[in-house]
Image (spheres, helix red, strand yellow):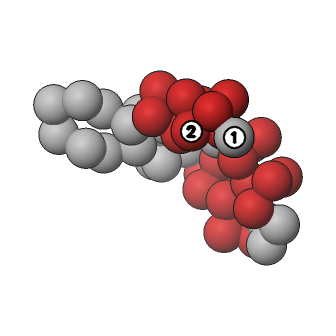
Amino acid sequence: FLVKVKKILESICVNCGKLKADISDPNFADKIRHIRDPKTRMGVV
């Protein structure tokens, strides 16, 4: 449980609260939109 929470908190910016991943990358955005399984989606992020 703590490992998952740590990964989630590390992927969010402390100052603005946005996701640190590059959403403007078309490949990344396409993968995130089409993956339904939360575990797999978290692995991609």
Q: Nearer the viewer, residue 20 or 3?
A: 3
Quarter containing the N terminus: top right
Q: Nearer the viewer, residue 1 or 25?
A: 1
Q: Residue at x 30, y 32 (%)?
A: 13
Q: Say whether residue 18 is left or right of residue 6.
A: left
Q: Is the Cβ of the residue at disc 2 closer than 8 Å to that at disc 1?
A: yes
The amino acid beneath tag 1 is Phe
Query: Which residue is disc 1 drawn over?
Result: 1
Q: Which mark is residue 30?
A: none
Q: Position of residue 5 (x, y in %)?
A: 56, 38
Q: Which mark is residue 5?
A: 2
Q: Position of residue 7 (x, y in %)?
A: 59, 31
Q: Secondary structure at mark 1?
A: loop
Q: Residue at x 83, y 52 (%)?
A: 40
Residue furthest toward the left? 15
User: Could you tell me if residue 30 is visible in this image?
Assistant: no
Q: Nearer the viewer, mark 2 or mark 1?
A: 1
Q: What separation in Å lies between label 2 and label 1 (alpha carbons)?
A: 6 Å
Q: Residue at x 47, y 27 (%)?
A: 10
Taking 29 as reference, is 21 above or below it? Answer: above
Taking 42 as reference, is 36 above or below it? Answer: below
Taking 29 as reference, is 45 above or below it? Answer: above
Q: Nearer the viewer, residue 24 or 1?
A: 1
Q: Position of residue 6 (x, y in %)?
A: 55, 29
Quarter containing the C terminus: top right
Q: Say whether residue 33 is left or right of residue 35.
A: left
Q: Residue at x 39, y 37 (%)?
A: 12
The amino acid beneath tag 2 is Val
Q: Say whether residue 21 is left or right of residue 18.
A: right
